[in-house]
Image (cartoon, helix red, strand yellow):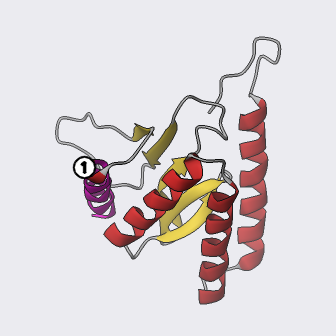
Amino acid sequence: MGAATEQEGGFSAEERAAMKERAAELKAEAKGGGRTAKKAAADEKACLEKIAKMDSPDRELAERIHSVVLEAAPELAPKVWYGQPAYARDGKVLCFFRSGIGDKERYSTFGFSPEAELDEAAGFWPTSFAVAGLDADGEKALAALVKKAVG
């Protein structure tokens, strides 16, 4: 997310907007009760709408990542998390995409939450990756990481 300005001494406008979106998401989840087929369809629709509203080239990148994630782990459920596309298992976000353009950063990111099973024996592993493009090798690497994260 974007850095806060010195004048604000706190969160950037993008960070505040993401927090507001997350609060609205939590409120909607509380109203919706358990995970139903209708809720899953609504979550996926919201995720695809967020992707569709992204500026190019992030939109195309997010569309491709969406396909790769769901091909690698069809059991993951798309949803919106902090206003960005995310993929959950049993209601808990496992991985997510953040638009660099939307965050006013020079690159987008694909990250994993603590729910992801990426732990390495050495006690050191990446949880987020800069994404400026995605070629065939990148797609294979992303698919392998998502499969590993699912366990």
Q: Is residue 73 visible?
A: no
Q: Quadrant of the C terminus?
A: bottom left
- The three-letter amino acid code for the residue at tag 1 is Asp
Q: Residue furthest top?
A: 6
Q: Quadrant of residue 122?
A: top left
| Residue 81: x %, y % from top left | 62, 56
| Residue 88: x %, y % from top left | 49, 65
Front-most of residues 107 and 44: 107
| Residue 106: x %, y % from top left | 55, 28
Front-most of residues 14 and 27: 14
Chief secondary structure of the magenta portion: helix
Q: Give the residue drawn at x 25%, y 57%.
A: 144
Whether 142 is among the magenta residues is: yes
Q: Quadrant of residue 89?
A: bottom left
Front-most of residues 5 and 92: 5
In the depicted structure, whether residue 6 falls above or below residue 150: above
Q: Quadrant of the N terminus?
A: top right
> Which residues fall within the magenta stretch?
138-151
Q: Residue furthest right?
A: 7
| Residue 102: x %, y % from top left | 67, 41
Q: Which residue is mark 1?
A: 137
